[in-house]
Amino acid sequence: MLLAATTPHPTIVPILLLLAFTVGMTIWLFVAVGKAGGPSPADTAVAYEHAWDRLDFATLWNLSGPNLRDGRTRDQFVRDKVAAYQYEAQALAGLVQSVHPEKVDVNGPVARVLARLDLHSGESVVDEMLLERIGPAWHVTAYHISTGDPRTGIGPAK
């Protein structure tokens, strides 16, 4: 008699509990990933400086806003930059030892980052970048090389 009282089919309650747990964990995962977000303006600025130091023009195109791309496709941009820097590449690449964001100002979808570049020569320079949030990512829209930067050949202001 007791065996007849227990059915081999579970009730709907455990299934609903498992479904509720799964939905709850899925929502939590989406919220956690959404809050973590993408790279910050400082992260983008540091990556941009490292890309310039490696003369990695494909990465520069990815990190640049449309105005710095001058309407060129990625392939055109890379080809033009490689041609422009072909004779200067050895003198300009590999100068940077480390990059640190010194100041980051964010105002809604725009940001300004001052990045300190410590060079292998022992010198240090600060570059300014203006960034804009385009979609989910930050892109460099303006780049000002510091005076006294050995990459420019321009001496310090007197």
Image (cartoon, rainbow, N blue to C red):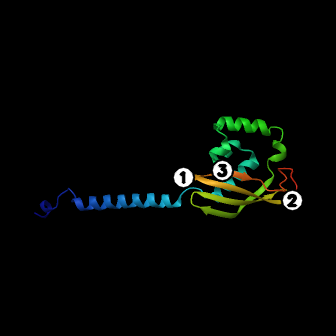
Q: Amino acid at mark 3?
A: Thr
Determine which residue is flagged by label 3. Answer: 141
Q: With respect to residue 57, does 32 lie above or below?
A: below
Q: Residue at the location (86% across, 57% down)?
A: 121
Residue 129: percent from the left, percent from the top?
A: 70, 55
Residue 125, by quadrant, is bottom right
| Crowding near the residue tagged with mark 3, few <14, some 14–19, many ≥20 C-alpha atoms within 10 Å | many
Question: Total label count?
Answer: 3
Q: Is residue 4 left or right of residue 42?
A: left
Residue 140 locus on image (x, y percent)? 66, 51
Dots 2 and 1: beta carbons under 8 Å?
A: no
Tag 2: Cα neighbours inside 10 Å, few (<14), some, or many (≥20)? few
Mark 3 or 2, nearer chain start: 3
Q: Amino acid at mark 1?
A: Pro
Residue 86 horizontal/vertical position (percent): 80, 37
How crowded pointer 1 is (Cα within 10 Å; few <14, some 14-19, many 20+) is rated as few
Mark 3 secondary-structure assignment: strand
Quadrant occupied by the C terminus = bottom right
What amino acid type is highlighted by mark number 2?
Answer: Ala
| Left or right of 141 in this view: 155 | right
Q: Can you identify the residue that label 2 sits on? A: 157
